Image (cartoon, helix red, strand yellow):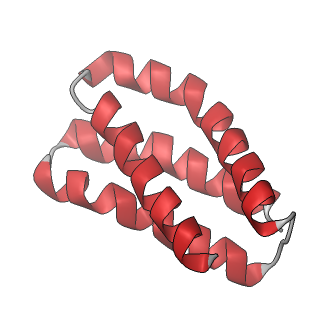
Amino acid sequence: MRLAIIVIGVVLSFLILALLSPLPFISFIVGALLAPVIADLYVRLLDRITRSKRGRELQLTVGIALGLGATPLTLLFIGLWTILLILLVMGTVIGRVMYQLR
């Protein structure tokens, strides 16, 4: 179960940034609007996988998985837009997911 959560988190964050990275300014607007929706959908998926379990261990696993998924594109596209996009979008997603999993 923990492996599935990690794989889904890594793939989800990689896809989010891969789709938003090529569009410099529009990605901030789209990312700011979609980040809370993506976080909510991810928590609902986690609820189905874990049967609505909560706790510190799940929070850390999900946070690390989402962070690991953002790392390859951060290293590939090192630049101001990518760093700001990651801080905005992934920061919002990780923060909301970890808050909802308390």
In the rendered image, the vertical position of residue 7 relative to residue 3, given as above or below? above
- Picture residue at 58% right of the left edge, 23% below the top: 33
In the rendered image, the vertical position of residue 16 relative to residue 10, given as above or below? above
Count of number-bearing discs: 0
| Quadrant of residue 34 within the rendered picture | top right
Closer to the camera in the image, 4 or 95? 4
- Picture residue at 43% right of the left edge, 64% below the top: 67
Closer to the camera in the image, 96 or 39? 39
- Picture residue at 85% right of the left edge, 65% below the top: 51
Relative to residue 57, is residue 55 drawn left or right? right
Q: Give how far across and how far down residue 95 sits, in percent.
A: 64, 55
Relative to residue 90, is residue 36 drawn left or right? right
Q: Give how far across and how far down residue 96 sits, in percent.
A: 69, 50
Relative to residue 21, is residue 27 drawn left or right? right
Residue 85 seen in the current view: no
- Picture residue at 15% right of the left edge, 44% below the top: 79
